[in-house]
Amino acid sequence: MQIFMNKKRILAILTGTVALATIAFFILTATHKPLVVLYGLSDPAIAAIKQEAGPSFKFMVIDGNEPISAHKRDISKADLVFMYDGKTAAEVGAEAVEPDESILALMPSAMREAGKSGTQRYGIPILFDHFEIDWNVSLIGGRSLAKPNTLTELVKVSNAIKGKNLWPIVCAGGNDEDLLGFVGALVISESGLDAYEKLVTGASEKQPFAELVRTTALKNTLDTLIEWRTSGIIHPEWFRMKSADVSAFMQMDYSCFFAMSLSSHRLLDRKIVEKVLTIDFPTDRKELDRGILAPAIVAIELRHSLPGNRAAHRLVAALAQGPAQANISGASGLAPANSNAATADKQADDARFWIAASRKPFPDPATASLSDPAARAALAASIRQYLEFEGQIN
């Protein structure tokens, strides 16, 4: 009888323990604030995501110049990570929850290619940047020249307008992001997607710079930029220029074509913006499914997030819907991923159209291939040296 009573008491204790554990779990789930990591994003993009997420989340902002490997502990605690797509995102995405296909259905097919490595999907794209060409309307129209639609036409117009105190093409190549974006866009424009992907593969395999130049389309692109510099259609110091220099050239009509990202365009003074229009990066190639340099911000939901707490998942789903897409696109200045989201202006709408009309959006080759910020900076430095010394490699 005593043994039987002991068993009943033990069963009651165990039942009570399970009940308490269940209650504790639901309390923890209800009170736990999911951690959202924002890695390598601009201040406007960070503010836009925080505004939509609201007070139910904790946020950690990590500078993109810091290697993600230095923040493994932070990532291990995160429920959700927002970052630019590329090599680092794929590494973080190794621990991702498989994204919801119904969310992806809201996007054009090309945009769905962001957040993937091969057939493995790890992230949901929510915003897109775009590397483009801004052009000074008055300088073109005042000389009875047409807007260039191909790379050959861009060079032809540039040769027609070059002169004293007028360098047709400039880029803030002193910024690594602009330099690598310009080079990447030109690789795709001149040599196509296969050439871009071969360059990315070589860089990801840690091939020396000299080997990349010898075996990939990088040489053709850099030699084109050297030729443009020699002929005077691109400013001789473009690879050292900063954003403020380009802004001054735009203001003073010292240049006509400005290779820059959509996010950089958003930082321009309104009076300068009124002087320019935008085209996607021109090419002579005839592929119907061409690539485009358009870095995506992806949302990566991590599988180690607290079981039962679906707040992170619901946030990603909400951010992909039209109203939230319009809000974060308008606040960040970037292009929405949703097919039907309202856009604040023609600039964002054009970028979305160009991306949707492509085969796939890509980040710059260094972001696509290298997860270490120092390695990306080293590649940019090697490119500058090659350009400065006109093809010499030390």
Image (spheres, rainbow, N blue to C red):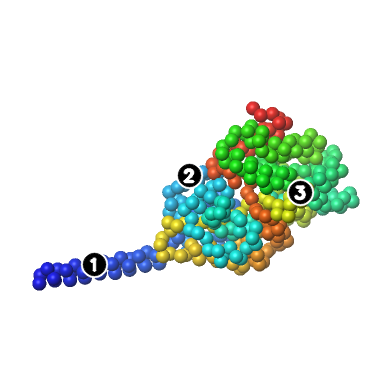
Nearer to us of marks 1 and 2 is 1
Mark 1 and mark 3 residues within 8 Å of each other at the beta carbon = no
Q: Is residue 70 left or right of residue 342?
A: left
Tell me if residue 247 comes above or below residue 382 in the rendering.
below
Marks 2 and 3, the one that precedes in the sequence = 2
Q: Which residue is mark 3?
A: 285
> Residue 94's x, y, as percent?
49, 51
Q: Which residue is mark 1?
A: 14
Q: Measure the alpha-carbon separation of dots 1 and 2.
A: 43 Å
> Residue 123's x, y, as percent?
54, 56
Marks 1 and 3, the one that precedes in the sequence = 1
> Residue 352's x, y, as percent?
68, 59
Q: Tell me the amino acid under the disc marked 3.
A: Arg
Q: Nearer the viewer, residue 211 or 322?
A: 211
Q: Secondary structure at mark 2?
A: helix
Mark 1 and mark 2 residues within 8 Å of each other at the beta carbon = no
Q: Measure the alpha-carbon separation of dots 1 and 3.
A: 71 Å
Q: Quadrant of residue 318?
A: bottom right
Categorize mark 2 by other alpha carbons within 10 Å: few (<14), some (14-19), many (20+).
Answer: some
Q: Which residue is mark 2?
A: 69
The residue at the point 76 percent across, 51 percent down is 286
Categorize mark 1 by other alpha carbons within 10 Å: few (<14), some (14-19), many (20+).
Answer: few
Q: Secondary structure at mark 3?
A: loop
